Amino acid sequence: MTKQHLVGYARVSSTDQSLDVQEKALLAAGCDIIRAEKRSGTTKEGRDELNLALSILRTGDVLMVTRIDRLARSIGDLQDIVRAVKAKGASLRAIEQPIDTSTAAGKCFLDMLGVFAEFETNLRRERQLEGIASAKARGVYKGRKASIDAGKIKKMKADGVGPSAIAKTLKIGRASVYRALAE
């Protein structure tokens, strides 16, 4: 019989955040493999370390996180991850929450926490949009600074350079050239 592996997964959203606390907690919990990354948890896409952690799970293994929000911020992604873990014959546990998908109570609590994590993300998004709308109304919010010099594009066009050549020269998309010319 093969040894059960505890595969830890740690995640923070931005590059200025530290993974140290999560990694130490996962080590203290007995994880013999830890995968960590600095990526948003709002989607499962592009999370290479999570995908690697899922790919190495075998029957009887446990995917371990400190908290469920480190794994996913949407109920759909969380359910997809749990299904992937289950398909491998493994289970999911959270150190700081009573989550253990090998038990009925743990599965129930996981579903409840997943709903609250998604709710929190949606509230944060609503507050952000309200803040942007308020700033726009006050004339404070201007959006990000233009990265394309429309004047340069118009001058090149006036000099007889075609849109494709302008795009290639400035290393931008043709659609950006057309948008600048339409202004």
Image (tube, rainbow, N blue to C red):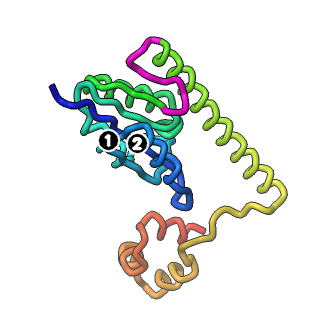
Q: Secondary structure at mark 1?
A: helix
- Dominant SS of magenta comes to loop
- Residue that appears at 62% across and 30% down: 119
Q: Which residue is mark 1?
A: 53
**Hey, what amino acid is under mark 1?**
Ala
Question: Which contiguous range is marked in magenta?
Answer: 95-104
- Between marks 1 and 2, how big is the CA–CA gap? 7 Å
Query: In x, y percent, where is residue 105?
Result: 49, 13
**Hey, what amino acid is under mark 2?**
Tyr
Question: Of callouts 1 and 2, which one flags the residue occurring earlier in the amino acid sequence?
Answer: 2
Q: Secondary structure at mark 2?
A: strand
Query: In x, y percent, where is residue 44?
Result: 41, 40
Res 46 visible: no
Q: Kindly indicate the quadrant of the structure image that contains residue 151.
A: bottom right
Q: Which mark is residue 9?
A: 2
In the image, residue 163 sits, relative to residue 131, either above or below, namely below
Along the viewing direction, whichever of 62 and 151 lies nearer the viewer: 62
Q: In the picture, which quadrant includes the N terminus?
A: top left
The reply, left or right, for residue 84 in relation to residue 138 is left
In the image, residue 123 sits, relative to residue 149, either above or below, namely above
Other residues around mark 2 within 10 Å, as few (<14) / some (14–19) / many (≥20)? many
Count of numbered circles in the view: 2
In the image, residue 44 sits, relative to residue 106, either above or below, namely below
Along the viewing direction, whichever of 60 and 123 lies nearer the viewer: 60
Query: In x, y percent, where is residue 48?
Result: 34, 49
Query: Is label 1 in contact with label 2 (beta carbons under 8 Å)?
Result: yes
Query: In x, y percent, where is residue 72?
Result: 48, 36
61 within the magenta span: no
Q: Kindly indicate the quadrant of the structure image that contains residue 93.
A: top left
- Residue that appears at 50% across and 40% down: 70
The reply, left or right, for residue 97 in relation to residue 71 is right
